[in-house]
Image: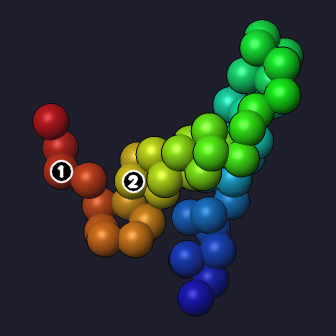
Amino acid sequence: MAAEAVGREPRGRILDGYLADQERRNGPVSDRARQWAEEIFDRAFGQEGGRPAAG
């Protein structure tokens, strides 16, 4: 459980930074765009469904 929380922490910080940057550049981020970004970050950080395959 602790390892799971540690894995979410960097993902959350990076996601927050990404969304803040998008908002600065393009204005408010829609709920749909926010959900899309969360799904992409979940995949990139190996949450829900395991680690992504190495390219």
Rendered position, 8 above or below 53: below
Q: Earlier in the sequence, mark 1 or mark 2?
A: 2
Q: Position of residue 14 (x, y in %)?
A: 66, 40
Residue under label 2? 43
Name the residue beneath numbered marker 1: 53
**How far is mark 1 from mark 2, CA to CA?**
10 Å
Image point (62%, 39%), residue name = 33
Residue occupying the far bottom of the picture: 1
Instruction: Classify residue 13 as left or right of residue 5.
Output: right
| Rendering coords of residue 31 (x, y %) | 71, 47
Say how many tags the image has: 2
Return the residue nearer the eye: 15 or 7.
15
- Quarter of the rendering containing residue 49: bottom left
Quarter of image, res 24: top right
As displayed, is residue 39 above or below residue 4?
above
- Quadrant of the rendering where the C terminus is positioned: top left
Answer yes or no: is residue 17 visible. no
Residue type indicated by callout 2: Arg
Circle 1 SS class? loop
Query: Which numbered mark, 1 or 2, is in the foreground of this view?
Result: 2
Rendered position, 45 above or below 17? below
Give above or below for 23 relative to 17: above
Q: Quick check: 42 left or right of 1?
A: left
Tag 2: Cα neighbours inside 10 Å, few (<14), some, or many (≥20)? some
The quarter of the displayed image where residue 20 is located = top right
Disc number placed over residue 16 in the picture, else none: none
Estimate how packed mark 1 is, as few (under 14), some (14 to 19) or many (20 or more) residues with alpha carbons within 10 Å: few
Asked which secondary structure carries label 2, the reply is helix
Q: What's the amino acid at mark 1?
A: Ala
Q: Which residue sits furthest top?
A: 25
Residue 12 visible:
yes
